[in-house]
Image (cartoon, rainbow, N blue to C red):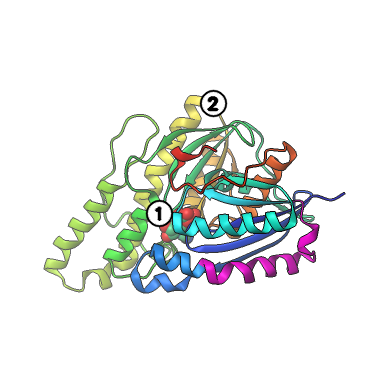
């Protein structure tokens, strides 16, 4: 009998549902929340409310696109954390209610594992080649910047991470300082394509090991900008492409330097990237460049699997389903990784 998994993601500002049949993706439906654009960042209270409005239609659409009835589901996988608690509670409570009404098991998924295992999402007849274990994964999103040693589907070790801001957070904040929209990542990416990455220099962290730091860069960007605006009030307008390109280059250089160090030390040549910032053109180009220079075999996910989506939750859930690794009804959502315990 076929195994049908419904995946549910609601950790931040995307309500998403996906259906897999025997590990193959049938549907992946996401409702994003435009309501936050006016505030220049995600407003948790508004995010929870929007999840409440979106969750039922999104799940219905995912089941419809997959061409199945809810009674055919074998299990429900859901993001239990980390993320915004109010947002998570919507997905977790919905998953519990649906699983109880159908009498099927629930599978809790760590959102970060989901991002890493996005490399194992396959649709019928696609040609994406998944990495083999062990591999390194650079996970870069609005909330995380980590280098993860992936030993198996469930054994992942964080060997480096940011000690302050995440890369995506730094990009979003610098974009806000420039008066650009939210989220800043795609806007900076677009502007950067027309700018000179060598035009400006911003400070880079000097931290031991594989850890990252982006708060100094953010401050350096802000202070430099203040000085330049004193001389030319329209400085941003005159230089926005060069500013975006230089900022992007600085962030990509910081990310790649530590990743290269880890790959060299651990003698690993399979290197993947995941999370929202992996959509960035400069970062993708740097991966291709490092592949040529250092003989890396690189894994870059499809755009639709880089930002938050339920397909990655469903595939992680599928691997746990095969191990019969289910979670009890009493499992609470958790906002931080350290609370990742039943
Ligand atoms: O993984 P994600 O969708 O959400 C979480 O943080 O959980 O990542 C969102 C982040 C935001 O900071 C956004 O600005 C960034 O990913 N992002 C990008 C690009 N697309 C999204 N950053 C740089 N270039 C992009 N093209």
Q: Residues within 10 Å of mark 1 (few under 14, many from 20)?
A: many
Residues at badges 1 and 2 in contact (C-beta under 8 Å)? no
Residue 235 within the magenta-colored segment of the rendering: no
Query: Residue 39, can we see it?
Result: yes
Q: Residue furthest right?
A: 1
Q: Which residue is under mark 2?
A: 267
- Mark sitting on residue 168: 1
Query: Residue 276, can we see it?
Result: no
- Residue under the image location 52 percent in, 66 percent down: 51
Residue 136 on image: x %, y %: 54, 36
Is residue 122 toward the left or the right of residue 36 in the image? right
Asked if disc 1 is less than 8 Å from ligand 1, the answer is yes
In this rendered view, identify the residue nearer to me: 142 or 326: 326
Quadrant assignment for the C terminus: top right
In this rendered view, identify the residue nearer to me: 212 or 4: 4
Main SS class of the magenta portion in the image: helix
Tell me which corner region of the image, top left, top right, bottom left or bottom right, holds residue 258: top left
Residue 152 on image: x %, y %: 63, 33
Is residue 137 toward the left or the right of residue 229 in the image? right
Q: Classify mark 1: helix, strand or loop.
A: helix
Mark 1 vs mark 2: give the one in front.
1
Magenta highlight range:
51-74
- Residue under the image location 40 percent in, 33 percent down: 210
- Residue under the image location 34 percent in, 54 percent down: 170
Asked if disc 2 is less than 8 Å from ligand 1, the answer is no
Identify whether 229 is placed above or below 293.
Answer: below
- Residue under the image location 44 percent in, 38 percent down: 338
Residue 55 within the magenta-colored segment of the rendering: yes
Compare marks 1 and 2 and give the one earlier in the sequence: 1
Tell me which corner region of the image, top left, top right, bottom left or bottom right, holds residue 182: bottom left
Q: Residues within 10 Å of mark 2 (few under 14, many from 20)?
A: few
């Amino acid at each position: 009998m076929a195994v049908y998994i419904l995946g549910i993601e609601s950790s931040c500002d995307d309500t998403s549902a996906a259906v897999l049949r025997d590990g193959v993706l049938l549907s992946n439906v996401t409702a994003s929340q435009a309501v936050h654009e006016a505030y220049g960042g995600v407003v948790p209270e508004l995010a929870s409310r929007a999840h409440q409005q979106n969750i039922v239609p999104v799940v219905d659409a995912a089941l419809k696109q997959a061409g199945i009835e809810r009674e055919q589901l074998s299990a429900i996988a859901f993001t239990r954390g980390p993320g915004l608690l109010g947002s998570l509670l919507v997905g977790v409570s919905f998953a519990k209610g649906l699983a109880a009404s159908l009498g099927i098991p629930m599978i809790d998924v760590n959102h970060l594992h989901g991002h890493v295992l996005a490399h194992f999402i396959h649709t019928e007849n696609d040609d994406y080649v998944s990495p083999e274990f062990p591999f390194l994964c650079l996970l870069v999103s609005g909330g995380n910047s980590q280098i993860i040693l992936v030993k198996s589907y469930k054994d992942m070790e964080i060997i480096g991470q940011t000690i302050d801001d995440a890369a995506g957070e730094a990009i979003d904040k610098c974009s806000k300082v420039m008066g650009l929209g939210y989220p800043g990542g795609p806007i900076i990416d677009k502007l950067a394509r027309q700018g000179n990455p060598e035009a400006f220099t911003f400070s880079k962290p000097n931290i031991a090991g594989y850890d990252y730091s982006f708060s100094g860069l953010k401050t350096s960007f802000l202070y430099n900008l203040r000085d330049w605006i004193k001389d030319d009030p329209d400085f941003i307008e005159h230089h926005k492409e060069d500013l975006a390109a230089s900022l992007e280059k600085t962030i990509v250089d910081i990310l790649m330097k530590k990743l290269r160090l880890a790959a060299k030390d651990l003698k690993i040549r399979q290197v993947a990237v995941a999370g929202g910032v992996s959509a960035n053109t400069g970062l993708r180009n740097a991966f291709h460049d490092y592949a040529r220079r250092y003989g890396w075999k690189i894994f870059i996910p499809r755009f639709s699997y880089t930002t938050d989506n339920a397909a990655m939750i469903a595939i992680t859930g599928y691997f746990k389903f095969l191990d019969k690794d289910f979670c009890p009804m009493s499992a609470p959502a958790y906002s931080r990784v350290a609370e990742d315990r039943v």
